[in-house]
Image: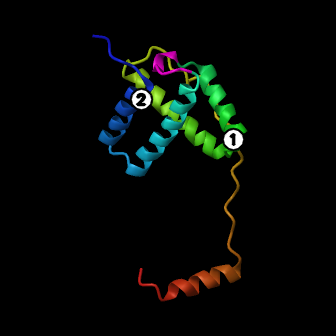
Amino acid sequence: MVEEKTFLTMQKKFLDYLKKQGKSSSTILAYGNDLNQFADFLNKRQITQVTSVNPEHIEEFKEYLNFNKYLPKSASRKLNSLKSFFRYLKNQGLIENNPADSVGYPSFETKPPRILRQMEYRALSDAMRHHIR
């Protein structure tokens, strides 16, 4: 019997795999939410099988995120979820080609951390002085 390779079936396998790997529940939840969003995106295009997903679909999803005003850092995290998902499917032999391999991450600049001013540092230090931890 040929295994059904719907997106949702493969998503469940992937999330189960993450649990077995000991990933935190918040990580698994974030991956699940990102994959659900991509599944909804695919469903609107009548795509239900993971084997039907191609790099153009993932590029369109990136454009969709940009159009809907997702910050580049958030879009990058969502894309990372997709890349991990498709890498898992490829490594498990569930798909022949990884459609996310050729898709690049959105660019975003990382800002250096803001350094507390002396007054802010003192206020924080005073607030913590009587804190037991």
Mark 1 vs mark 2, CA separation in Å = 24 Å
Q: Nearer the viewer, residue 28 or 133?
A: 28
- Residue drawn at the location 67% of the way across and 34% of the way down: 64
The residue that disc 2 covers is 8
Q: Position of residue 99 (x, y in %)?
A: 54, 21
Q: Relative to residue 75, is residue 13 depicted above or below?
A: above
Q: Residues within 10 Å of mark 2 (few under 14, many from 20)?
A: some
Q: Position of residue 105 (x, y in %)?
A: 64, 34
Residue 40 horizontal side relative to residue 27, left or right: right
Question: What residue is drawn where x is 41% and y is 84%?
Answer: 132
Q: Residue extending furthest top?
A: 1
Q: Secondary structure at mark 1?
A: loop
Q: Which residues are magenta?
A: 46-52
Residue 53 in the image: x percent, y percent?
53, 19
Q: Which residue is mark 1?
A: 68
Query: In terms of image quadrants, where is residue 127?
Result: bottom right
How many C-alpha atoms fall within 10 Å of the one at disc 1: few (<14), some, or many (≥20)? Answer: few
Inspect the magenta stretch and tell me whether residue 50 lies in it: yes
